[in-house]
Amino acid sequence: MERPGEGTKFTLDRKIFSSDIWFASPWKLKIFLYLLGNANHKNGNWKGIALKRGEVIRSYRRIAQDCGYKIGYRWKRPSISTVSQICEELTKELRIERRTERGAQIITILNYDDLQPLRKHEPNDETKDYRTITEHNNNDKEYTSSYEDEQAALIEETKKKIFDKARILKAGLVFEKAENFAGQMLKKGMHPGAVLFALEQCIKYKPKEPFPYCLRICQKESGNLYEAEHHLRSREQYGEGRQD
C-alpha cells in the first residue's frame, strides 16, 4: 500500500555541499537526510497521534534498519547506540527536536519550512507535467541562469570560509603557509568545498606535515564533490528518476 506522500519529492539546497553535515560521518548525513525525506510534508495523524508538517515517528531501531546498506549478501547497519548518539548530536546542533507521546518517539525537523518550502502553485495530478516544449526550453534557460547565480554566491561564501580557516591555521602555527596553499588549490581548480574540508581537518587533527595531508584530502574529495554536483544538477534540470 502506498503511504500518504509517497511518490512526492523533497529538495536539497546546494549549500549542503559546504555545510558541516556534508563533512560529517556517512551515517550522520544519511540519517539526517532519511529523517528529512520521511518527515510529514503536511499535517497528519498516526494512530490517534497528531503530527505536524516536518514531524516523523521513528524509533532508533527502525532508523538503524532503514539506513543500512548491502555489502555482497549481507547488510551493514548502524548500531542503535550509534543512531541514538547521532540524534543527540543533531539535537544539540538544533537540526531536530525529539519528544515521546504515547510511547512513540516523534522527531521534528527544525526549520523544516525553510528546508522544504511550500510551492505557491503546486499542480494537481490531472494537470502536472503538461508543459509545452517552448515552456520547457524557457524553464531550462531560467534554471541555468539561476543555477549559475547560486553557484557563484556559494563559491564566494565558501572562499571566505577557506581563508578564515587558513588564517586560524597560520596563527596557531599549525600550517603557516595555509593561505598560499588555499590559493594554489583554488587556482588549480580544486573544489572549494574540498579545500575547506581539508583545512578544517587540519585544524582538528594538527598533522605534522600539513601540506601533503591537506593535498591528499583535496585530491580525494574534489572529484567526489564535482561529480555529486553534476548528478544533482542533471536530476533537477532533466528530471532523472522522476516518480510522479
Image (cartoon, grey):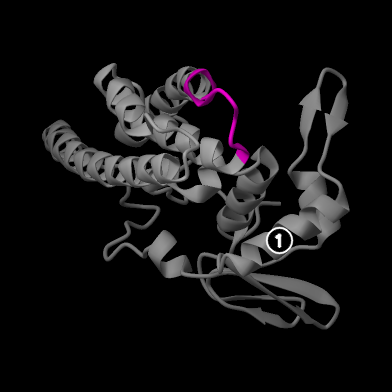
Residue 236 occupies which quadrant of the picture? top left
Disc 1 marks which amino acid? Cys
Q: Position of residue 163 (x, y in %)?
A: 31, 41
Q: Position of residue 221 (x, y in %)?
A: 49, 24
Relative height, residue 203 to residue 124 (above, below): above
Q: How many marks?
A: 1
Q: Is 212 placed left or right of 233 in the picture?
A: right
Residue 158 occupies which quadrant of the picture? top left
Q: Position of residue 173 (x, y in %)?
A: 47, 39
The one nearer the camera, 182 or 22, is 182
Q: Residue at x 47, y 45 (%)?
A: 172
Judging by the rendered image, the residue that carries numbered circle 1 is 87
Q: Is 26 placed left or right of 68 in the picture?
A: left
Circle 1 SS class: helix
The one nearer the camera, 98 or 216, is 216
In the image, is residue 25 part of the stretch drawn in magenta?
no
**Neighbour tally class for label 1: few under 14, some 14-19, many 20 plus, Cα within 10 Å:** many
**Over which residues does the magenta segment extend?**
205-213
The one nearer the camera, 62 or 203, is 203
Q: Position of residue 234 (x, y in %)?
A: 35, 27
Residue 239 shows in the view: no
Relative height, residue 223 to residue 205 (above, below): above
Q: Residue at x 39, y 65 (%)?
A: 114
Q: Residue at x 47, y 19 (%)?
A: 215
Name the quarter where the C terminus is drawn. Answer: top left
Q: Is 41 placed left or right of 104 in the picture?
A: left
Relative height, residue 77 to residue 55 (above, below): above
Residue 241 shows in the view: yes
